[in-house]
Amino acid sequence: MLNSVVEMPMRLEDNKINPAFAEARHFILQPSFSVKRFYAISFDILAAMLTVWMAFSLRFELWHSPVGNQWLIYLLAPVLMIPVFIYAGLYRVVYRHSGFSAFITLIQASAAYGLLFICVLFFLNVPGVPHSIGVLQPMISLLIIGGSRGFVKFWYINNDIKEQKGVVKEKLIIYGAGSAGVEIMNAINRSKKYDLVGFVDDEKQLHGRTINGMKVYSFTQAEDLIVQQGISNILLAMPSVSRVRRSEIVNKFKKFPVHIQMLPGFEELVDGRVSISDIKEIQIEDLLGRDPVPVNNALVNEIIEGRVVLVTGAGGSIGSELCRQLLAANPSKLLLVDNAEHNLYIINNDLQRRRLRINSITEVVPLLGDVTDENRMAEICSVFEPSVIYHAAAYKHVPMVEHNPVQGVRNNVLGTLTVAEVALQYGVSSVVLVSTDKAVRPTNVMGASKRFCEMIFQALAEELGHSTCFSMVRFGNVLGSSGSVVPLFRQQIKEGGPLTITHEEITRYFMTIPEAAQLIIQAGAMASGGDVYLLDMGEPIKIVDLARRMVELSGLSVRDIEFSYTGLRPGEKLYEELLIGNNPEPTQNSRIFKANEDFVAWPKLLRELGELTFAISNNDVDSIKRHLMRLIPEYQTNSKTTDYVALEQKNQCLNIALCA
């Protein structure tokens, strides 16, 4: 008890002393920026005077004791140096975070000061002061001041390393020892997340060399390094590399449980500079997408530039990318039509930001509207008078449309009919239908409805008495679109699985959204009327292989996650096709082909449309399917009812009968 009483005043005294001591320590070791600037200027003044003394001592080869007019030089050096350094911005630099550019600025400022100093010496011609002092002193001061800045940077880095001891970091190697790799290395060295082990590069001359203390390895050496040091991350620091090459590099590391990330392309980097925040996950789109084929921009600009362009379904995956690429072609107005308020809001905000960034004079106009609403579509076309329409509005999710066939056919077929008729009524020059490979020998309502849409455009293109050019562009799945398998797999991997796949043998064609939109615009620009264009989708990809690739990209092994096979869904088929007939014709673009497909003449098609509209109004699913099968002989469907409303009605009738 006595000890406690005795110790209490001492503890209180400690509490009085410690805060003041801590504050003083913080002021000295972690001063504000203005105090740091005062330290730097004070040091440079002393350094200027010290280096004058060193220059005299070297020149006379003795310990110099200034006399007479020589004192003038001791004062002259800082008087000339400090204003030059202030003007060069050296006291605005944070040296603990500075790079090579800051030391280049120091060299330039020292050179300017040295030139000024020697000129003043020659002009004053002070007795007892050799002109060689004007050369020696700036050189020595550059070494002293540059060394002090280097020491500050080293001291802070060393301090950071001490603070980070005990923190478990992820081991990382950078693939690519170019300028982007070196820049990101500097950023990573300041990071608390990664422990950089070295570089990997394909350039043989670089193997075995070091860059800022980091060794450059060959790929073979990197394989051993991954195993021996437990590398968990690989960063592709090659912003200009092609997709094909990127895919080859990723495939090299497939057998290792490493997480692969990348830097975006130079066009996506702000001011071409690289930082930690620029590191992004490699997406499957980055690997399966092909390198772009040059498009005929002159041809595209001819039909877009300075004109009013309308996009239906503007908030969808394809529609929104069409809008982004059309904005770059400088239409006078870009009309965004969509019935989903949120989607329209998102794409409008995106385009408004882009418009400001590229200084575009295009007026972007968001318009809520349903393509099946003839009055609304007619109102839009009469007021804005569009020259070109891209019709991308559609229900596209196969199982969803299969379970809601009436609404699917109503939206897709009657919406397309409305757009086509309004375009004819108001003299639109060109209308391009965005179609799908599911329209070829369809096994589902969605595909059959899109084939019907194509036939409407084909039939109207053959009708006389109008100047509207109707064309269609047919392609397969786009990577990452809403409702597609890629976002689903991504979410399932994030949740730890299982990955749900309908069938082990199911294959699909895939294309990136930007490439699809680019080729749609190009095909529409080439059209002469009634053209059915096919986009070269490359080779079909097994969905199970796509899933495995995505698992590997996440840094996991296919053994770490379960694959669940659920069976084909209603209307789904194992393989997709792009062509009904044979012998597609090549076009001026190597990825666009022209098909010659049969169709029904407009008078007969119009009668079918009348009967189909009646069936839709009566919610008659069976009648709708019969009309589709009669008009599209290739349509093969399961007679089993999948419509949720019809199934519920059937259950209710059955329950009533049982109760009776």
Image (spheres, grey):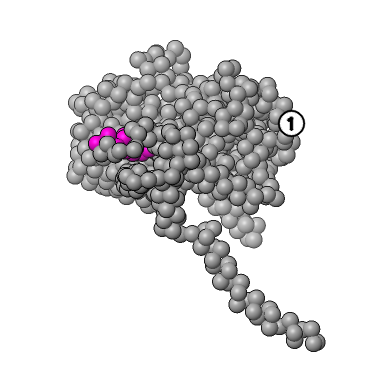
- Say which of 226 and 122 sits in front: 122
- For the C terminus, give its image quadrant: bottom right
Crowd rating for badge 1 (residues with CA inside 10 Å; few <14, some 14–19, many 20+) = few
Q: Is residue 479 above or below residue 403?
A: above
Residue 126: quadrant of the picture: top left
- The residue singled out by tag 1 in the image is 227
Residue located at (74% from left, 81% from top): 7
Residue 380 image offset from top left, x and y in percent: 24, 45
| Front-lying residue, 405 or 260 | 260
Q: Residue at x 54, y 27 (%)?
A: 177
Q: Disc 1 marks which amino acid?
A: Val
Q: Can residue 569 be seen here?
A: yes
Q: Residue at x 41, y 21 (%)?
A: 293
Indicate whether residue 115 is drawn in magenta. Answer: yes
Q: Position of residue 398 (x, y in %)?
A: 52, 38
**Residue located 50% across and 44% down the image:** 148
Quadrant in the picture for residue 386: top left
Residue 624 visible here: no
The residues colored magenta run 109-123
Q: Looking at this view, is 87 or 623 the one in front?
A: 87
Q: Secondary structure at mark 1?
A: helix
Locate residue 372, reporting x and y percent: 34, 44
511 to the left or right of 490: left
Tell me: residue 496, above or below residue 285. Answer: below
Secondary structure character of the magenta stretch overall: helix
Instruction: Name the quadrant of the N terminus.
Output: bottom right
Counting from the top left corner in percent of width and height, residue 211 is at: 56, 29
